[in-house]
Amino acid sequence: MDAGAASNLAAIRDRIARAQARFGPPPAAVTLVAVSKTFPAEAIEPFLAAGQRVFGENRVQEAKDKWPGLRQLYPDIELHLIGPLQTNKAREAVALFDVIETVDREKLASILAAEMARAGRILPCFVQVNIGLEEQKAGIAPAETVAFVELCRSVHGLDIVGLMCIPPDGVPPGPYFAHLATLGRAAGVAQLSMGMSGDFEIGIAMGATHVRVGSALFGHRPPVATGF
Ligand SMILES: *Cc1c(COP(=O)(O)O)cnc(C)c1O
């Protein structure tokens, strides 16, 4: 298990480095977010032992069950929320996570801001964009993204650092990633979270600063509703 985690991690880091060398951005500018959803703490620990520190989870309750114990062993963990957030879980999310990647509506922006003020904890946030305008996916419509980022910043005081998207299945993701990059420039954010196990090199080619890689690191997940 240990050797498997270390070699999977090395292989993905190598693919990220080679994609960066081919397409930019400059080396060290792409952060690997290791998506550990559905995997138990025992499966995550070998990745921590191998040096990985940035992880993504999509459910508040699952993160609460797994991460406080791991943080005691590795205090420098950076945990990203990459799944939809209900406003009644915002308080727990602010306590458990270090980065929120899924700000997708004004009510959530407002409640997150209030919870961060209450906790004295300012978390960097990404706005999730429904880049393919798919009914089943969360996110702000592309045409509303620039105004929403501005609203999050000026009205709610959130620290919006980037945009995040999950492109439609079954079609080439490149144009969607390019669109997100264009929206990011227009909104004045520096970071782009785009690319998963099947397409992170394309994300990097289009300017990703964060790639969210799960199954290519941890192996196959049992099929569950992920709340995309
Ligand atoms: C599960 C998940 C991922 C990782 O997907 P893989 O295909 O396993 O790499 C990335 N982003 C989000 C939002 C996810 O829910």
Image (spheres, grey):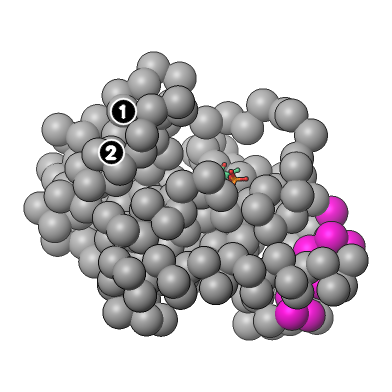
Tell me which residue sits at (74%, 72%) in the image. Answer: 7
For the question of whether residue 225 can be seen, the reply is yes
For label 1, the crowd category at 10 Å Cα-Cα, with few meaning under 14, some 14 to 19 and many 20 or more, is some
Which is more toward the observer, 191 or 115? 191
Q: Nearer the viewer, residue 3 or 74?
A: 3
* Amino acid type shown at disc 1: Gly
Tell me what residue is drawn at x 45 percent, y 20 percent: 136
Q: Position of 25 compared to 200: left or right?
A: left
Residue lying at the far top of the rendered structure: 135
Callout 1: helix, strand or loop? loop
x and y percent of residue 113 in the render? 37, 55
User: Residue 159's image quarter?
Assistant: bottom left
Q: Which residues make up the magenta segment? A: 40-50
Residue, disc 2 = 176
Quadrant containing the N terminus is bottom right
Ligand 1 lies under 8 Å from the Cβ of mark 1: no
Front-lying residue, 101 or 158: 101
Residue 42 placement (x, y as % from top left): 88, 62
